[in-house]
Structures are given as C-alpha cells and as structure tokens.
Image (spheres, helix red, strand yellow):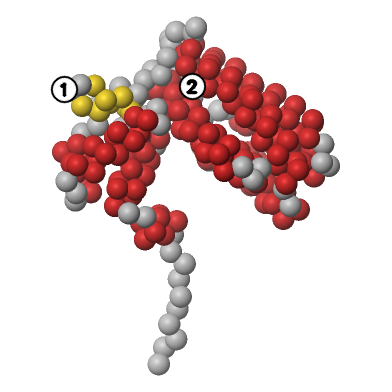
Amino acid sequence: MAKEVKTTPSPEIEYLQNNSLPEVILKVLETKILNHEILPGERVNEKKLSEELGVSRIPIREACRKLEQEGLIEIQRNKGAYVRELEMYEVLNLYDIRVALDDLAGRLITAHASETEIKQLEDLVDKMDAVNNSGDVNNFYPLNVAFHEMVYRFARNDRLAKMYKGLGRELRLFRSQASEAGGDMVDFDQKFNIDANLEHREIVDAIRAHDADKVSEIMQTHLLKGRDRTVRGAEAAGLAIA
C-alpha cells in the first residue's frame, strides 16, 4: 500500500480553510484593490464579484463597508462603492505618522528581537540583494514590504503592527493611483532599490548591535527617502502637491 504523502497547503488555501466566508471575501476584495485589479476611482462591481465568487451581494457590501473604515473604499450614497482616490496632503500625513511609528518600532525591535529573528531579516536582505543583482526590478517591492512587516512583527506590539499595515495599505493604494496617472510608481529603479537595501542591511546590523538610536535614525531616514520618491512620482503624474 502506497504511503500517504502529506502536503503543506499554500498560504491562500490555508487562509480559506481557517477563516469565515465574510473574512475570505474581505481578503479577496482587498487583494484585488491592492493588486490594481480594481483601480482608484473605479466602482466596485458587486454583480461581477458575486458571480465570480459564487456568493450573494450582501457579504460583498459588508466587505465594502469594512474597507471603507480602513480607508480603501468610499461609499457614495445611491451610487455604490468606489476605490478611494487619495489627495496628496493625505499621503504626506500618512508619512508623518509613519515616521513616528518607525521610531517606536525601531526601538522595540532592538529590545525584543532574538538572534533567530535577526537572521530572518538578514536572509530577506540577502534575497533582495540577489534580486537587485539579477536586474529584476519588479520583484524587489514585495520583498521590501515583507522586510518592513517583519520588523514590525518582531517589535512585539500587535497594535503597532496593525497600525503599520493600515497605513501601508493606503500608501500602496496611492502608488496604484499615481501609476495610473502616469507616474513612475509601480517599481522603483534599480539604483534606488540597491541604495534602499544597503539601508536595510544597516538596520539589521544596528539591531544586532542593540543600538536603538541608530536603528531609529536609519529607519526614519530610509522612510523619508521613500516619501521623497513618492512625491517625485506624484509630481511626474501631475498630481497636486500640498
């Protein structure tokens, strides 16, 4: 008798298995928005989604209401739900908040991260180096997002990590908006990515050295460079700068 081979489910299948239908629909809709399948300013087509997912429109409307609370959707009376378009002043406000959060996250991860966790960060930096060396600009951004999410996770403060993810979703939404308007926002150029990853490595080294001031300083400098790059992309797209 053949031995049964145990397989590990993919993250997507595992999510479906471990969450309720409303949570799954919420995740599907959020992913479609953040992956630019439904663009900023575009109406959420409830009929199309209900047919695609094999559900009624009710859980889709519930998901829209939750995403409105998270800043991704705007529900217009008698018109429906639309993917939100952010004003530039809102984006700059988000970065102001991120500066404060990064300072706290940097200090907390320095206090709490284990050597195993520091090695995980280091491995991710190595992966980004490999991507940069191959000239594969497109795959740098997801790894960059994963690095910063890992920093917040290892900071051991769930509320802080949740706040970071919320801000990150809105900033990703703006990247999509600026890209559609003609800005160079979807992928940073290779030189920018190489410089950014040098700073990632400096962050990891400072965490390992238990230098909280240095970690905080590098993280904030790193973030502000990203903010300036976002502003330049928005200007190139003709979006108003507050």
* Residue that appears at 79% across and 30% down: 213
Secondary element at tag 1: loop
Query: What is the three-letter code of the residue carrying label 1?
Result: Asn
Residue 128 is left or right of residue 165, and the answer is: right
Picture layout, residue 29 above or below residue 218: below
Q: Nearer the viewer, residue 48 or 188?
A: 48
- Image spot of residue 62 (x, y percent): 26, 39
- Image spot of residue 93 (x, y percent): 53, 17
- Image spot of residue 230 (x, y percent): 54, 20
Q: Farthest residue toward the bottom?
A: 1
Where is the N terminus found, in terms of image quarters? bottom left
> Label 1 belongs to which residue?
78
Residue 71 is left or right of residue 46, and the answer is: right
* Residue that appears at 53% across and 22% down: 94
> Label 2 belongs to which residue?
184
- Image spot of residue 25 (x, y percent): 30, 46
1 or 2: mark nearer the eye: 1
- The disc placed on residue 232 is none
Q: Earlier in the sequence, mark 1 or mark 2?
A: 1
* Residue that appears at 20% across and 26% down: 80
Q: CB under 8 Å between callouts 1 and 2?
A: no
* Residue that appears at 19% across and 36% down: 46
Residue 122 is left or right of residue 63, and the answer is: right
Picture layout, residue 133 above or below residue 40: below
